[in-house]
Image (cartoon, coloured by chain):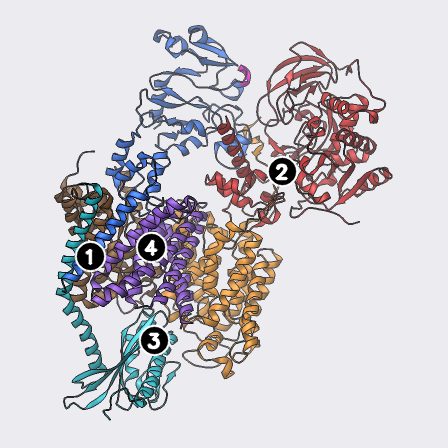
Amino acid sequence: MDVLIPIITMSALGFLFSLGLVFAYKKLRVQEDPRVLLVMEILPQVNCGACGYSGCRTFAEAIVKGDAPANGCPVGGEEVAHQLVKTLGLEAVEVIKKVARVHCRGTTSAAKESGLYRGIFTCYASHLVGGQKQCSYGCLGFGDCVEVCPFDAIYMGEEGLPLVREDKCTGCGKCVDACPRNIIELHNIKQNILIFCRSLDRGPTARKACKNACIACGICVRACPEAIVLENNLAKIVHYKKIPQDKIPDIEKCPTKAIGLIHKEKKKQEDDR
Amino acid sequence: MMPNNLFILQSSPHFKDKDSVPKIMYAVIISLMPAVLASLYFFRFKALFLYLACVITALITEALFLLLRKKSLDSLSDGSAIITGLLLAMTLPPSLPVEHAVIGAVMAIAIGKQVFGGLGQNIFNPALVGRAFLQTAFPVAMTTWIPPITQKINTATFATPLGNLKFQDAVAQGTLSPLKDLFFGNIGGCLGETSALALLVGACYLFYKRAIDWRIPVGIICSLMVFTGMFWLINPNKYASPLFHVLAGGLIIGAFFMATDMVTSPVTPLGTTIYALGIGVLVGTIRLFGGFPEGVMYSILLMNTAVPLLNQFTRPRILGERRKK
Amino acid sequence: MSLSSRMVIVLTSVGLISGALLSTVGILTKERIALNKQLEIENAIITVVQGTHTSEKLYEEKDLVVYGSKDENNQLIGFAVYASGTGFQDKIILMYGTNPSFTKIYRLTILEQKETPGLGAKITDKDAFLQFWENKDSSKPLTLRKPAARSPEELSPFEVNTITGATISSESVLNTVRLSLEKLMSLKKEGKLGNEE
Amino acid sequence: MKTKTFPRGIHPPEYKDITANKPIEVMPPPEKVFIPLHQHFGKPAQPLVKKGDAVCVGQKIGEGQGLFSASVHSSISGKVLSVEDYFHPLGMPILTVSIENDGEDRPLQEIEKTEEPLSLSPKELCNKVKDAGIVGLGGAAFPTAVKLSPPKDKPVDMIIINGCECEPFLTADYRLMLEFTDDILMGAELARIATGAKRIIVGIEDNKKDAYALFQEKSAGKSIDVQLLKTKYPQGAEKNLIYALLRREVPRGGLPFDVGVIVQNVGTVKAIWDAVHKGKPLYERVITVSGPGIKDPKNLLVRIGTPFQEVIDFCGGIEDGTNILLMGGPMMGLSQWNPEAPVIKGTSGILALKTPVSFKEYECIGCSRCVEHCPMGLVPTRLAKHVKYNHLKGAEEWGILDCVECGSCQYTCPAKIYLVQWIRLGKNIIISNKRKKSA
Amino acid sequence: MELVALFISAILINNFVLHYFLGICPFLGVSKKIDSAFSMGLAVTFVMTITAVITWVINHWILLPNNLEYLQIVSFILVIASLVQLVEMFIRKVSPPLYQAMGIYLPLITTNCAIMGLALLAALKNYSFVETVVFGVGSGIGFTLAIILMAGIREQLDLSDVPEPLKGAGIALIVAGIMALAFLGFSGMIK
Amino acid sequence: MPPRSIGEEFTKGLWHENPIFRQLLGMCPTLAVTNAVINGIAMGLATTFVLIFSSIVVSSIKKLIPNQVRIASYIVVIATFVTMADRFLAAFFPLISKDLGPYVPLIVVNCIILGRQEAFSSKNSVGRSFIDALGMSAGFILALLILSSIREILGAGTFLGHQVLGSWFEPWVIMILPPGAFITLGILIALTFVIEHKIKQRR
């Protein structure tokens, strides 16, 4: 008897429980996103809450919606993260690698200060009072872009300008959004010519404010009229592909070096480091 | 234009009041001085050593954390660490071994303040965290009292007025300390809490410097008096009078100097009022029904935990806002 | 096989196997655990009523169990009383031995407590607390000595000591003993403790 | 006399005695003026002149675009030097017409004077105001014509004439009230007619008792209330002024229309009278040039477009040790780095101050002074923290968009936190995010 | 009177989180926002009450009469798990708003040691039926109190400069420690 | 991701995926029973027993179990082993069993165990699951040992019941009480973060 009663009890419990589950499975099921179920399959189902969501289901829903990162489940660890990525195809296929590039060379030595800035040390905040440089288009130098970069791909150089580590940059565009002066843009990594200025000021004013400003002299336009134009006192590359490589030396005659080859810039960065 | 001649660029407003954080902090320190002097008078060198140990340790701990977090050591001069050290020492029994006081001061600054990010960010009153730590770590040492020098008795152990009330049934026995002694400080107890007079003198200075919110001490004292008064009216032979409760133990120092800590009290007027009333009621509850004779420290810490919620749910009405009913 | 029936079968069989395993373990350990419990009580009885040879449960209710202790000659030498009361944190369960007329307490031991370590928990400590409970005269209600005495000699036979800083724990032990003694007296009058005398 | 006021607020030192007793001086027109085409709240004006054109005083050189805009007029006679981006006191380069003075001060030929301005219809009045390019002269530069034509479903019964001038240093409005009392009262009457309101209330702070007495005397027998207000900052802020005078609360995110009120600055109503009665567009205004950094502080009538430098030179120049130059008052004014910036319609004063160059910013210690003083009932420290730690949603829940940036919180903050800048930052980000979302 | 004492004790003195360390995982995990903490607290209180009832019935009607104490663990956990799952599905079907407010926290509760701890403690302490229910409700409220206070504090900590290594669990545990210290003030209140 | 070597499978539980310090799982027993080293060890061993055996069982029957009753079956398996451990302790180590109180039965809801079954054993071979369970348990015991050593030494001046600090030392009672447990664990987690950060930087 001592042996039988527990066996019977346990079997009965198991039986009842499974009946309950079958019932629940059949009658109480609610329609839901099949992807959520797929994710649920992969997740550990511990419902421990370690992910910060209220259980695996909500976490799964968040992943499917794209609110939660695939590696957000500390219990599952890397295995689960990889499976999730595989299942949901979260990794977007990159066709052309794009990287962030900074359109300003208003270094601390080149760009003139306007006043003594006193206040919150972020670009956006200083932008609100006009910025502490005379050029009202250039980099403010407080590194909002550095702050937001999730990949540690942008850092503040010694010259007070942000520099991009193009190998680390994923082209997510966070820095582009963060810059209140819109001087960061995403470019095809292969494009090797860049205009390092955004100033729409007239030549003399721009020149007064920053030694490296585009003064709209038109030398580059003359070198390559089909690819470069002047617009609002600023040179603009309209058709990058139409720049023949042999014209580059002519373009580089720019008196303020506001347009030039990116690799030279990169080499300078490495020297900086 | 010469670069050194540049105008300042800043966001409005361009006017600022003269008051500053260090000024407020030093006002608090000055206001504590009467009570410190009173305790030096009552407990002599024991008090001096404890004050020195706590303040110096607090400063050193603060400095270590600042170095660790690679922050400027300038913050040491804002006076907040000195206040923590002083307040902690003032809540310790005079006979406490100095090494215990040192541990308390380390804990007060470390887990009471710096782990939250330093000045202004802590949830709990650092001095009280230090004291609560000591109370729990060294319960015996923290509840052993010596009589003040002015009471020329020589017993190894000695009870505080509240201890008498709790464990000796002092009301029925008629051995309750006279209110006069409570007022001047001629009783056993923590260093800084004994002399109500000295504390009140300091508090007046704080009011003058507008460094504390009047709602907090008033709220605490009123709610405690109402709470204990109710029981006193029901049975004056069992319960002590409300005035006794206000003057005894750490209530005055708690209400004027601890609960009013700006960092750990609510910022909204309504929240502040609820906070103060809550402390008073909790003090009464713990003193009358709890296991400890004194409940000021626990009450303030408990209400500290509720401060974020109070702030959250007592947002003032914005001009023009129509609240849903 | 349908999914539903598979679910039922798998879970039932898992339950079955687990039941079988558990019953085996249960049976194997049952005696041993019971023995442990019994040993604990017996040890306690021997501690509080020294010279006990045999003991038997005379009375049992919630929070109060009385054991009669007999020596080798089957003479009743006292009662071991198992009692519990509320301490500072939680229940304190204790046992003490009395003489057959309940006028003397031989010894006290604490079986279970969750008092503050280093403070209230000293009630389990012989030097700090238990030694002050040896051979007390319980013909009058016992009282608590405050502030604490340093040695048992300082105390009168009707006094027990407090632990410095843990008045409440000390008090609750005393109260538990007092209350259970009162209860025992009335039980005895009703003759519910056997008729040995 | 019982004085009215609003809850909370601050009382900074006034410094008004520096210029309070100095009558308004007329500054001669400068050699060159730089008139930005965007001096108001709303869309910039479209240029009507080009390089080389000759213009006269009061000639329209920029046409307001759409509803929320204002026209711009030349303030001198002469030749247009250029129409291009130029430095603007708000910090951004703005399309600006620069004109060289020919010294003739030639007025426009066909000035439309109206002999009986009080008989005009609301519509006509509004058109005249619009034509004259009048904007609110208190500082926000909201196009007045828009204000004078409230939406049909929100009838206006009350016009408040704002004579508070609660900012320290500034006395331009005070002098206007003393010297042009009649013009102001007539202008107010025109505004009342234009909006169909029933009554006019003039609010004057009790540090300007003589102006109050003068208004009382002149308004006797008219349907005008003159009300004395307790001196407090920011009494001149619309919502607070309305509450102080009428105990009406403008709903969150709403405008004074919503409670049937329109608030006009004394300078603005005087400009309305000038425009309608004398046919004079808004090309000059009264400003206060003051502060410890100005050698000879004055109240001046200045042509729009005059560079700050010339105004300051006219007042004796700048003292050594001046390190901050402001357009507007010290509480809400904008700091300037370039003294070449021109006076615009919204310029209520030019201040040169000497402030300590640096001070330490502390962490918030929760003293709750900002809460005690916020005239809007906000919790500024909380707002600033939400912005600092990037919890913009929380900032919105706590009412960041209700902030009027009056600066009371930062003034009282013992930790010297840049509360207003944080809040302004948060507001900017939130608003631009909203725009992105709706776009 | 005893029941009142038990109730207060369960909320304040022998608080599940701060004294028994039960339910730490959700206490740390779901205390980031006040709203969700409140919902979680509600859900826990609800499940605790039901669990208290059901496990008492199982323990006293099935296990103890048959001398099957050793099946407590298995049967309690099975019952709790199935119960929670059924309740969750039921609420989900019947009342979606309630599900959003409370139901989504239900699965989290299955493996919440607070629930299992409640069943085991009630069995260990030999509570009567009424006592068990009071204990369950009180413990649930105690858990809710602790988690809401914690959530308030953590929302505030989001707005402060907590040292990097302590962010998240580290500071939460230290706060819990100080909360436990403060709650010690209530000890000895029930005699 | 290349499959881990056996060694890595074991060591990941010690540090990189340490259940207490890194994954913050199974906090309840960690905090509750670490007031003395002996309790910590006992708890660790009991958990190890349950974890290893349930891992083996789960990984060997994983194919038989339909998905819908997966959790339920695992729970039964785990609960069975927990009961065994509990009974064993009660029978042979009654004092420790009493000290641990309800926390041994509570192993059944320890997230580490169910978590490993779900995340690992239900997807891997018996051998791998065994190694994984061994590593995880080692990590768990390690954490318990560190925590309980600190608490016992500071809180009682003893280690495994032996006096290690001199009589000059007055024990910090708080370390044995709940606040001490929370605070110590909080600080330890912060420390592991710092160490992990240092390791990452060095790479």
**Image disc number at residue A41:** none
**Residue under label 4:** E23
Gap between marks 4 and 1 measured at Cα: 27 Å
Q: Residues within 10 Å of mark 3 (few under 14, many from 20)?
A: many
Q: Is residue F4 above or below residue C14?
A: above
Which chain is tinted blue? A
Which chain is tinted cyan? C
**Identity, as a three-letter code, of the amino acid under mark 1:** Met
Mark 2 vs 1: CB contact within 8 A: no
Gap between marks 2 and 3 measured at Cα: 75 Å
Q: Secondary structure at mark 1?
A: helix
**Identity, as a three-letter code, of the amino acid under mark 2:** Lys
Which chain is tinted brown? F
**Residue under label 3:** C85
| Quadrant housing residue D295 | top right
**Residue under label 2:** D354
Question: Residue C94 vs residue B6: left or right?
Answer: left
Confirm whether circles 2 and 3 share one chain: no
